[in-house]
Image: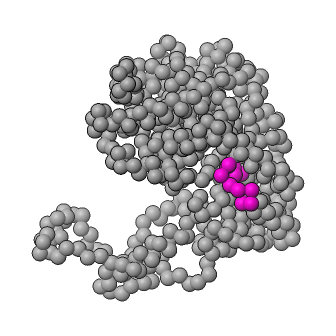
Amino acid sequence: MKSHGITTLSIQEPLIFDQGSEKRCAFSLPDEGRFGPIEQSIPKHWIREEIEGFPEVSEPELVRHFTRLSTWNYGLDTGFYPLGSCTMKYNPKVNEEAACIPGLSGAHPYQPESISQGALRLLYDLERYLSEITGMDRCTLQPAAGAQGELCGMMLIRAHLERNGSGRRRVLIPDTSHGTNPASVAMCGFEAVPLKSGTKGIIETDAVRNLMDDDVAAIMVTNPNTLGLFEKNIAEIADVVHKQGGFVYCDGANLNALMGMVKVGDLGVDIVHMNLHKTFSTPHGGGGPGAGPVAVKETFAPFLPVPEVVKEKNGIFAFNDDLPLSIGKLKSFYGNFLVCVKAYSYIRAMGARGLRQATQTAVTNANYIRKRLEGHYHLPYDDHCMHECVFTDRLQKKRGVTTLDIAKSIIDRGFHPPTIYFPLVVEGALMIEPTETESREEIDRFVEAMIDIAEETEKNPQNIKDSPRKTKIGRVDEVTAARKPVLRWSPGTDE
Ligand SMILES: *Cc1c(COP(=O)(O)O)cnc(C)c1O
């Protein structure tokens, strides 16, 4: 099996801590003559006296150290990244180019509206594109992530209920939901009520009917759900919830399975959040900035965060803070503006037809993987999937090989592992999301690597259990890492 993508340990690579020599230096500061002693420019309490044991290296040694470290990383630009529920699609570089246009990247949040017309128009148009894609009336770009979008949506529901004198407190959340859902609900002061999905992995209308009463504020549905299945009963469920005075919130982080094909607004959804850093191709991972816009039906418009971007009669764009019922500000200024620029650029480049095609290809790719791996891995829900498919380790477990072992072994075969042990309703889950940006050849290579692991499990399970062998670091002690994190290197330690 050809290994590609992940760098393998072949030659002895020197670590920076073994390099250098006393008084070697990678920088030169202006001589003291120009600026005076260092204590004059930097307050004394910030100058660390006790630093000892740091490697003293030259500039080339330093550059090589960091460049080498960068090649140890695995990212979308080096290989296939089938992390389910995360939509790790390729991010076109033209979007980065757009975000680097000086008038956008250098715009100051306090600069006057009169010289920000381009930026304001971009925000205004993006809100409308996202409203159109979701079938909603209005949108806010302010939330910085999917989870903050959920919180925003819950705050909108609370504001609406309070305005109408209702004290409803419960929110129904299916057992296939993302972990952030109950957390957002709780943060907003609601009570999360678990809703069991049916034997086919989707919500049954009767289950909702049985839980609905006049204390239920909303149902929070992820569609497609985290099993990669379309919630077929959603419109009927929305009807039941609405008839009893509740609202329907849709976690739309998985919009990569719907955009251009289905508008959630047509299915009875009142509020939906999107993840620009998943569906709309803005880079994510590593803690970088994201965006979780929230689109709503007209009835929630008065409660949206401020400021909103408005287009005045003369065609001039402006910020409006005058929304007396607004839930206020969720994020400093206007959200993560340059993430919005990238998503805008993506939508413009793709066009309506392109977005639809992306969805179709993403769903086709996931079903292709599902069909090719069926028989090699246990498929808990044997139905057409949307943009991702979920397998388990049931067959491999008979030979002592678990989902974690399979994930480690796929690393040795040159791929990032799928999402594992999620969704929680599936024991030993392996959740694979290929996205539309992978070629048939790449997907075939991944499938063959997965089949190879299944076959090796039958012949020599210990081989799988001993992986990864080709990475810089083998298996880490995750429990100790979580309980006793060492977050800072100090001289004289190996940690
Ligand atoms: C990723 C995801 C979220 C959370 O999004 P963040 O931007 O990570 O906060 C919520 N729900 C679902 C279904 C997701 O896949």
> Does 440 lie within the magenta span?
yes
To which quarter of the image does residue 354 belong? top right
**In the image, residue 224 lies at what x, y percent?**
69, 37
Task: Name the image quarter holding residue 398.
Answer: bottom right
Q: Is residue 56 visible?
A: no
As for residue 131 lying within the magenta part, the answer is: no
Can residue 94 be seen from the camera position used here?
A: yes
Q: Residue at x 68, y 31 (%)?
A: 262
Say which quarter of the image contains residue 491. bottom left
Q: Quadrant of the N terminus?
A: bottom right
Which residue is rendered at x = 48% and y = 17% of the image?
162
Q: Position of residue 312 (x, y in %)?
A: 37, 22
258 relative to 78, above or below? above
Image coords of residue 307 (percent x, y) = 37, 29
Total labels: the figure holds 0
- Magenta part mainly helix, strand or loop? loop
Give the answer, above or below, for where 486 lies relative to 421: below
Q: Which residues are magenta?
A: 432-442
Q: Residue at x 43, y 36 (%)?
A: 122
Reply above or below: 97 against 174: below
Q: Where does residue 288 sit, x and y in percent of width and height?
A: 47, 52
Q: Residue furthest bottom?
A: 21
Q: Is residue 137 left or right of residue 226?
A: left
- Whether residue 212 sits left or right of residue 22 in the image: it is right
